[in-house]
Amino acid sequence: MNEWVGFSSVALAGIFTGSYFLGLKHMGPWKWENLWLVYSVFAMPVMPLALALGTVPHLGAALSAAPGSALSRVLLFGAGWGIGSVLSGLGVVRLGMAVGVSVLIGVDAAVGSFVPMAVNTPDMIVKKKGLLVIIAVVTLIIGVAVVGFAGKERERSQASSAIAVQQGGLAAGLIICILSGIFSAMMNFAFAFSGSISQAAMSLGASESGALNLVWLITLLGGFIPTGLYTGYLLTRNHTWKNYLLPRTGLFWVIGLGMAVLWYAGVLFYGWGAKSMGRTGAVIGWPLFMAVLILASTVCGFATGEWKGTGAQAKRWMGAGLGILIVASVILGVANQL
């Protein structure tokens, strides 16, 4: 029963995370870096710290009790995930949205699932459950590739160059997106390899979910370092700090907060769900999270008119890609029950 509760929680996490980007469609006089910094501040240091203070008794003592090596490892994994987030923007500019996102999500899903399986549950690899996970991840990668192809067809049918390859070469874009996928998977590493931190928090009275909030606090503080530095660089280079002082922009602070709430809810539900799925939660949960994330973001794209004027062929390819992602999710559901 817990496995299905966990499975559903991870799926819900994917829906939250796949829809938080909708705020970027309503930036008004702000630029991307203005809204992204507001979202990042709320989502990474502010909300995780507030939740950890409210759910982890003796927070300072819990941090002191946790092994320093574990704290450093999780912080570095968080920073790695932040680097992956920055690289994703650079890679997508070079490859285009459709191909770039397909490459980095595919790599993210594969690395984020296989590494925890190899380290924490190596016995699972040769068992039916492990083989099903491998099949599901391969299916997911195929589905992501088909979705990417559909996106490319959409670009052609709309005769728009706005999302096309803009700078750099194909090889450079591929390398950056592959690196982005590897680094982005480190968020799951932080979750999968943080047991001693959770144990330290629980030994001082924290619940299992409260202990996980401490893990996310450390992870996201690490992630905020490269994210904040890059966003600050853009604000300085583009002279957009002044946009925060523009009149009648209060709504955009609320939009940034809303994005943060949705995204951080996705993180929390993923953690709760993967933990409920047992020792294989990080292995099965991560690719499921990626699959539902893509499904949710695509549905949001259709709902907001991104596919308006798109030819029937592109829509058929997208339907096929989404169908393959659903098949991958079903396979993960079967593996979860074994």
Image (cartoon, rainbow, N blue to C red):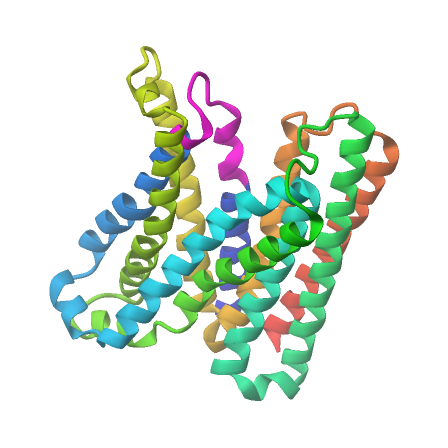
Could you tell me which residue is drawn at 61 percent across and 40 percent down? 93
Q: Position of residue 94 (x, y in %)?
A: 64, 43
Instruction: Find the magenta span and give its range.
Output: 19-34
Q: Position of residue 33 (x, y in %)?
A: 42, 32
Residue 334 horizontal side relative to residue 206, left or right = right
Q: Quadrant of residue 222?
A: bottom left
Q: Is residue 168 above or below residue 183?
A: above
Could you tell me which residue is drawn at 70 percent across and 35 percent down? 164
Taking depth in this image into account, of 313 and 32 the one nearest to the observer is 32
Q: Is residue 199 above or below residue 102?
A: below
Residue 280 horizontal side relative to residue 298, left or right = left
Q: Position of residue 229 (x, y in %)?
A: 34, 44
Residue 36 horizontal side relative to residue 154, left or right = left
Q: Position of residue 24 (x, y in %)?
A: 50, 30
Taking depth in this image into account, of 123 and 240 the one nearest to the observer is 240
Residue 127 part of the magenta segment: no
Taking depth in this image into account, of 217 and 279 the one nearest to the observer is 217
Residue extending farthest front: 168
Instruction: Residue 310: tell me if it is visible.
Output: no
Secondary structure mostly taken by the magenta-highlighted segment of the chain? helix
Residue extending farthest right: 313
